[in-house]
Amino acid sequence: MRCDLLAVGTELLLGQLVDTNSAWIGEQLAANGVASLTHVAVGDNVGRITSTLRRLLDDADAVIIGGGLGPTHDDLTREAIAAVMGVELVADEAVASTIRELFAGRGRRMPDNNLRQALVPVGATVIPQRRGTAPGLICPVGGDRVVYAVPGVPHELREMFERAVLPDLMARSGETGVIASRVLRTWGETESGLNERLDAVVAELDALGDPTLAFLARGWEGLEVRITTRAPSAAAAEERLATWEAKVRADVGEVVFAVDDESMESVVLDEMRARSMTLGLAESVTGGLVGARLTAVAGASDVLRGSIVSYASDVKFELLGVTPGPVVSEPAAIEMAEGARRVLGADVGLALTGVAGPDEQDGVAVGTLCVAAVSDLGRRTVTARLPGQREQMRQFSVITALDVLRRHIIEPS
Amino acid sequence: MRCDLLAVGTELLLGQLVDTNSAWIGEQLAANGVASLTHVAVGDNVGRITSTLRRLLDDADAVIIGGGLGPTHDDLTREAIAAVMGVELVADEAVASTIRELFAGRGRRMPDNNLRQALVPVGATVIPQRRGTAPGLICPVGGDRVVYAVPGVPHELREMFERAVLPDLMARSGETGVIASRVLRTWGETESGLNERLDAVVAELDALGDPTLAFLARGWEGLEVRITTRAPSAAAAEERLATWEAKVRADVGEVVFAVDDESMESVVLDEMRARSMTLGLAESVTGGLVGARLTAVAGASDVLRGSIVSYASDVKFELLGVTPGPVVSEPAAIEMAEGARRVLGADVGLALTGVAGPDEQDGVAVGTLCVAAVSDLGRRTVTARLPGQREQMRQFSVITALDVLRRHIIEPS
């Protein structure tokens, strides 16, 4: 089964918008064993959409079109699909009344052009809209091929892909079982190091053929180990994933910080919330990034009291009570953490101090990070030498520090 | 002149990497009057790269290929171009010795496969490498068309595009003059509002035909007004841009916060540095984002003393001296700013308090933001109702607050 992609929108060609949809769909297809070999973007031009779609269908069994389904005159995906199918567009009364109801429900007048979104190529199946006003389409072409059309708005596209496109594609591919995967997120080991430590597991899996194991580098989000299986049922898939997750954890469990949709920040907040612990931060090199990342998670206020961003050295000395002297060191990080705990009235203090560059500081090299976590559980410190330019170093500092905090809580020293 | 794009790399199809290069090149081409109508991504497969390139050259005068120029066996762009040109690949001794010197200079052994990067299609011109080890290529095809190949690493691609690809493309397009543009970054006015206020300027430009004016929405980076001109010389272009920048500023000058590569944060830091002023922050809803954004700029330490992220209300009361009561209000923001100024020993205090959601707080609606800037210059406050979900609201809060600070400094009340 091969499914290629066509992104529609002049704003993509002009660089006003980066096409993140194709990467996202590509990843979902790969995870479900569907080959996707060509991704194309064209503008809002019905001739070009039509000819590109025809060309893609020469090689692919299926094409997913993202975008061009809106209400305006430059939303032309419906027209292009009808041309390729060789059929007319007709108004679908059910879709039209849904659109009218959406506007009525919001108490807004419906501009007439919205009814363009109710036009459906004869022979196509509508994917009902749940989030936006534009429905998606499943359009059979020439007996053995299919074109899917979904809105270009990322959250609408993703919802419709998961709900309707992927299941239909799987059914057409003759896949009778279930493809499922589990992602184990790791921090603190290199890709080659993980690979080496999982040598025996990889060899065993290579011999079996299923599940498969993949390593994906996510930069400052860590390294993912993804286990994917094809199984006759969801229950069988779940059992197989659980078995192999346990085997992977037996070898590298201490670097696994999260599973599937969890993030380092959500895990840290959950672990602290479960223990009714509060957190106070003292940041220097990161300038507020740790607090910003934690508070991106709704409900962070249960745990986070606040952060003292002590960018100037004398703020570290006067407000946090750090002993005057060089400030990029483990002792300084410990005093910062203790200061944050005291000043913010928190159970746990977490502090970061380091050198993001471009220049070294007090003879300490660019990329150096010192982290300390202190609480009644004890104290944990780490000094790391991080790669990258200023912003990359700062982002690596955030996940490094949150991992120190996580270990401080779950493996008290 | 039409120049289409081909991104090469299996990691793009698998969604392990989002293709930001095509958007970037597309924007540069548009700014220089070159049409770019199809962007394609394919994997590391020589047959598919070759056939896609042939197809693109059926319609386009030029194709830029990004990626597939590295040293490994799956870097196949050179082979595909040679096939399309119908020529052999030969080793270029100058390129080979540059690669050897790069490794020697770093004191590292050079794996032999690096010499693959010295292979050049007969008839092609080398674009010497400056940042990575792979050179770029300018490859004439069939007398009237051209293929450019540049590395996929974004900073290498951008440097080579600006240095060699764009000048060559402009020369081939018969463009004898200079295309130059100026970007005025604005905050505080909607796109339709800007458009309306610039009505007379737009009408005058429409009649003249040059320069052109474009509006680009950059989300929480603001709205750009881009003036682009074609002129016989750089000096003439500069004069024309200066003239029209002045006309635009006469109508909407008070919302222009930056020009070209400047950002809101770099402008605020520069304005404060020029006045020898220091800054202390008090953040709540943004959790540290304002400090994080400012400290992303190297040299922020000249200005920024630090930030008190008072996420819990009693940290606002106890550490910052805010009067106990509801904390999302202008009076609370003023007390927070005064507290930050005092606790951090800063000339200017800037404070943000608001509701990012998902739920309202003390009867205050999601999206509400109160900002205060205080100093010896006086006091400036703003209450805004910002759009978007949690993260979007927080990012809009950052630029809103920094703009309040900017105005507080340059237009003291």
Image: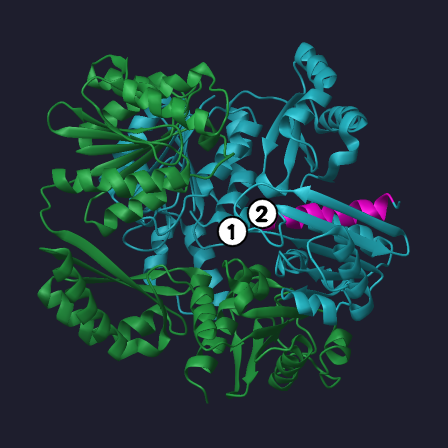
Chain colours: A green, B cyan
Classify B224 as above or below A75. below
Q: Is residue A346 left or right of residue A176?
A: right
User: Residue flagged by tag 1: what amino acid is it?
Assistant: Pro
Figure quadrant of residue B293: bottom right
- Magenta stretch? B394-411
Q: Is residue B227 left or right of residue A403?
A: right
Q: Which residue is mark 2?
A: B366
Figure quadrant of residue B403: top right
Residue lying at the far top in this picture: please name it: B207
Marks 2 and 1 in Cβ contact (< 8 Å): yes
Q: Is residue A208 left or right of residue B191?
A: left
User: Would you say residue A295 is visible in this rendering?
Assistant: yes
**Image coordinates for residue B124, horizontal then vertical, percent:** 40, 37
Badge 1 marks a residue whose secondary structure is loop
For image coordinates 26% across by 78% down, the residue present is A251
Q: Which chain does the numbered disc 2 sit on? A: B
User: Would you say residue B86 is visible in this rendering?
Assistant: no
Badge 2 marks a residue whose secondary structure is loop
**Image coordinates for residue A354, horizontal then vertical, percent:** 62, 73
Classify A117 as above or below A285. above
For image coordinates 32% across by 58% down, the residue present is B113
Classify B376 as above or below B86. below
**Image coordinates for residue B273, horizontal then vertical, percent:** 82, 56
Cα distance between the residues tagged 2 and 1: 7 Å
